[in-house]
Amino acid sequence: MTALGVQAQKLLAQRRPRRSFFEPSIRALIIFCASLAMVLTYLSICDGHWLLADDRLFGLWHFCTTSNQAELHCLRDLRQAHVPRLASGMAVARSVATLAVVVAIFGLELLMVSQVSEDAHPWHKWAVGSALFLLVSILSFGGLLSFLTLLRNEVTLMGLSLTFWSEFTASFLFFLNAISGLHINSVSRTDSATYPWGLPAKF
């Protein structure tokens, strides 16, 4: 290789685009919001009391009634609520919601690993993690929809508890993080594949 060729390669290497100052900040913000969403959905599912209807409290794990002394009497046997298909349907709803938490853990881990990975394709881990968050949002909304469908005759807007709205917020955050993560990943890959003057990086 001639000296002119060596100098040309050095010039091309120097003029390759660098990562924007805002890109690491945006990725860190996505990871933070995803962590917050995971905490919200974890607390919401562990508490599980999502609907208050008259003197009955419906949840993923228990069915509770209140006596005249305002004491909660909770039962794990959801068939005691006398709501058709509640026991079997709620088993599906909590299984889907729990699976969403498990998938979210793997997604968050992939996002964090992609930021410290030294291999040639950290964007691949980020893309997979973002896709998993999209799956998490679908599973979370599926669990919420199953719960509302089973108790459609009991649901009122004021009866939905704070933990229900926490799960709804977490599902929406997972969706936003997934879309944002996939978008910033595609933009950064496009920028890294082209030089500032529009010539392909392979050239």
Image: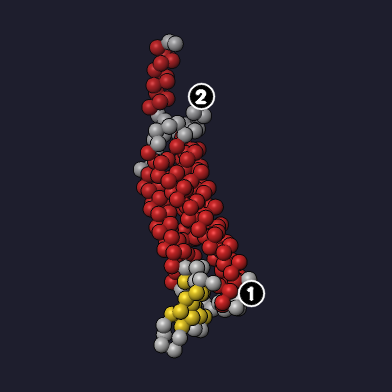
User: For residue 85, which quarter of the picture?
Assistant: bottom right
Q: Quadrant of residue 143?
A: bottom right
Which quarter of the rendered picture does the N terminus lie within?
top left
Q: Residue at x 41, y 14 (%)?
A: 4
Tell me which residue sits at (40%, 47%) in the image: 27
**Count of marks, rendered view:** 2
The spot of residue 54 in percent (x, y) is 51, 84
Q: Identify the amino acid type marked 2.
A: Phe
Residue in the picture at 40% in, 50% down: 31
Mark number for residue 203?
A: 2
Which amino acid, mark 1? Pro
Location of residue 13 by image quarter? top left
Task: State the residue position of label 1.
Answer: 84
Instruction: Out of 21 and 120, give the one closest to the viewer.
Output: 120
SS type, badge 2: loop
Q: Secondary structure at mark 1?
A: loop
Residue 119 image point, x, y percent: 43, 32
Alpha-carbon neighbours of circle 1 within 10 Å: few (<14), some, or many (≥20)? few
- Closer to the camera, 183 or 113? 113
Disc on the earlier residue, 2 or 1: 1
Q: Nearer the viewer, mark 2 or mark 1?
A: 1
Identify the residue at horizontal 42%, vertical 19% (top origin): 8
Residue 38: x percent and y percent? 43, 57
Q: Residue furthest top?
A: 2
Q: CA distance from mark 2 to mark 1?
A: 66 Å
The answer, for residue 183, to whether it is visible in the render is no
Mark 2: few/some/many CA within 10 Å (<14, 14-19, 20+): few
* Residue 6 x %, y %: 41, 16
Residue 97 in view? yes
